[in-house]
Amino acid sequence: MSQAAEELNVNQNQIRALPSSGELRGIQVGGQGLWRIGASDIEDYIAEAYRRTAERIAAGDLEDGAEAGDQE
């Protein structure tokens, strides 16, 4: 979980919620509710997030960042 949180630049609580909500693919291992998230699953999640963001920008639901002065 800590590696996934670092990769996505979020805290571990946010990462814990993603597999249980179905937003991020993972498997639950052991009896303590631990999740295993593969590197390819994180890559897929990021790619899908980029796709959804691009759709929202195209639909006018979200500023594209350049207009707001954000940098990559």
Image (cartoon, grey):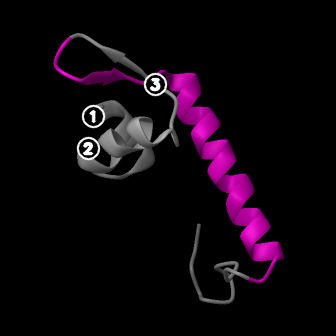
Does residue 65 lie above or below 26 as drawn?
Answer: below
Mark 1, residue position: 2
Does residue 59 lie above or below 36 as drawn?
Answer: below
Disc on res. 12: 2
Is 32 contained in the magenta span?
A: yes
Does residue 10 lie above or below 34 as drawn?
Answer: below
- Rounded to the nearest angstrom, the CA distance separating label 2 from label 1 is 6 Å
- Rounded to the nearest angstrom, the CA distance separating label 2 from label 3 is 14 Å
For marks 2 and 1 on the same chain, the one whose residue lies earlier in the sequence: 1
Question: Is 52 on the left or on the right of 24, as rendered?
Answer: right
Residue located at (73% from left, 71% from top): 56
Mark 2: secondary structure: helix
In this rendering, the count of numbered labels is 3
Residue located at (59% from left, 44% from top): 46
Mark 3, residue position: 26
Mark 1: secondary structure: helix
Please state which amino acid type lies under the numbered disc 3: Gly
- Report crowding for label 1: few under 14, some 14 to 19, many 20 or more residues within 10 A (C-alpha): few
The outermost residue toward the right is: 58
For marks 1 and 3 on the same chain, the one whose residue lies earlier in the sequence: 1
Residue 7 x %, y %: 42, 40
Q: What's the magenta region?
A: 31-60
- Rounded to the nearest angstrom, the CA distance separating label 1 from label 3 is 14 Å
Question: Is 24 on the left or on the right of 19, as rendered?
Answer: right
Is 15 contained in the magenta span?
A: no
* Marks 2 and 3 in Cβ contact (< 8 Å): no
Residue 52 x %, y %: 70, 58
